[in-house]
Image: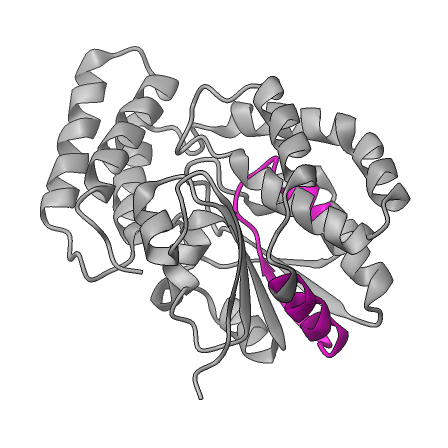
């Protein structure tokens, strides 16, 4: 997906919010904003938005000296979701269709995005859970995903945000139970950026209990293919199916010529327009390889 003009104010806002997370120094805030605007001014709009985010957040880390501005917030929300995980596990197991229930929760988890909403609360997460369980995704897409999982030996699951991955863990657990034998490789970001999931965040959530864990080698808030590691590309080449979580992965993998299912909430108008849905909608989208 290309960058739209409306992406620019979003990245400028993110840069100021991140600056305020790491320091109360207004001079530092101004330096970070100046660098963000310089990066945006030179940006090639034909490229995916996470490339712009990569440059902005590199500047934040460089100027502030803080490697992971969202670290404490990520740990706090992951902790809360691990607290409620047993209840969610029970609800999924008791449902008529555990696969569908776990899938819905995996999409619900995408509400946890501090790049979009820094004021997110526990109540917001609880509301997202209930809303997702009531959501009625396109039945043909659900059955297409179920069918593809039945015939897949290796799955690449590209994670998005910390905290959210607790829901991913539950979904991957049920993939393993219902479609064994299957090998799931969970992909984290290579370095901290926004509240995107890293190896450390993944281990805190216990992802290695249900999947092989790697990172993509990149510090972009997505999977910029030209910037990802050889290990990532090897796992991608071996995958029979890609499951892509969140907006940043959609922005960078939407042109992938490979069987891919995108799970996300459309949290901005640019994404909604690109997908062909309404802003705020939960999304299960299939993109098949080109003929």
Q: Report the quarter where the N terminus lies.
A: bottom left
Q: Residue at x 71, y 73 (%)?
A: 147
Q: Report the quarter where the C terminus lies.
A: bottom left
Compare residues 52 and 201 and report the one nearer the observer: 52
The percent coordinates of residue 48 (x first, y second) are 29, 57
Q: Is residue 30 left or right of residue 154?
A: left
For residue 91, above or below residue 140: above
| Residue 215 visible in rendering | yes
Q: Residue at x 63, y 77 (%)?
A: 240
Compare residues 169 and 99 and report the one nearer the observer: 99
Q: Is residue 145 left or right of residue 20?
A: right
Q: Does residue 105 show up magenta in the picture?
A: no
Q: Residue at x 71, y 76 (%)?
A: 152
The percent coordinates of residue 7 (x first, y second) are 24, 43
For residue 282, above or below residue 155: above
* Magenta stretch, residue numbers: 141-169
Image quadrant assignment for residue 23: top left
The percent coordinates of residue 275 (x first, y second) are 39, 57
């Amino acid at each position: 997906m290309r960058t739209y003009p409306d992406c620019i104010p979003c990245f400028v806002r993110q840069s100021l919010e991140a600056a305020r997370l790491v320091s109360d120094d207004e001079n530092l805030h101004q330096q970070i904003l100046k660098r963000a605007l310089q990066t945006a001014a030179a940006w090639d709009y034909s490229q995916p938005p996470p490339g712009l985010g990569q440059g902005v957040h590199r500047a934040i880390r460089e100027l502030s000296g803080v490697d992971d501005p969202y670290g404490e917030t990520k740990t706090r929300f992951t902790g809360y979701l691990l607290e409620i995980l047993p209840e969610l596990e029970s609800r999924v197991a008791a449902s008529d269709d555990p696969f569908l229930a776990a899938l819905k929760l995996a999409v619900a988890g995408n509400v946890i995005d501090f790049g979009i909403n820094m004021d997110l609360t526990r109540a917001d997460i609880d509301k997202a859970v209930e809303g997702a369980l009531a959501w009625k995704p396109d039945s043909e897409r659900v059955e297409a995903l179920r069918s593809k999982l039945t015939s897949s030996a290796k799955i690449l699951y590209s994670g998005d945000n910390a905290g959210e991955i607790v829901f991913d863990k539950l979904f991957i657990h049920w993939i393993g139970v219902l479609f064994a034998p299957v090998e799931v490789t969970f992909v984290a970001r290579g370095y901290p950026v926004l509240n995107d999931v890293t190896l450390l965040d993944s281990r805190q959530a216990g992802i290695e209990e249900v999947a092989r864990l790697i990172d993509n080698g990149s510090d972009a808030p997505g999977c910029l293919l030209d910037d990802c590691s050889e290990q990532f590309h090897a796992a991608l080449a071996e995958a029979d199916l890609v499951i892509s979580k969140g907006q940043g992965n959609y922005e960078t993998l939407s042109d992938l010529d490979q069987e891919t299912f995108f799970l996300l909430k459309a949290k901005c108008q640019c994404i909604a327009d690109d997908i062909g849905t309404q802003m705020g909608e939960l999304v299960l989208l299939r993109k098949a390889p080109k003929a």
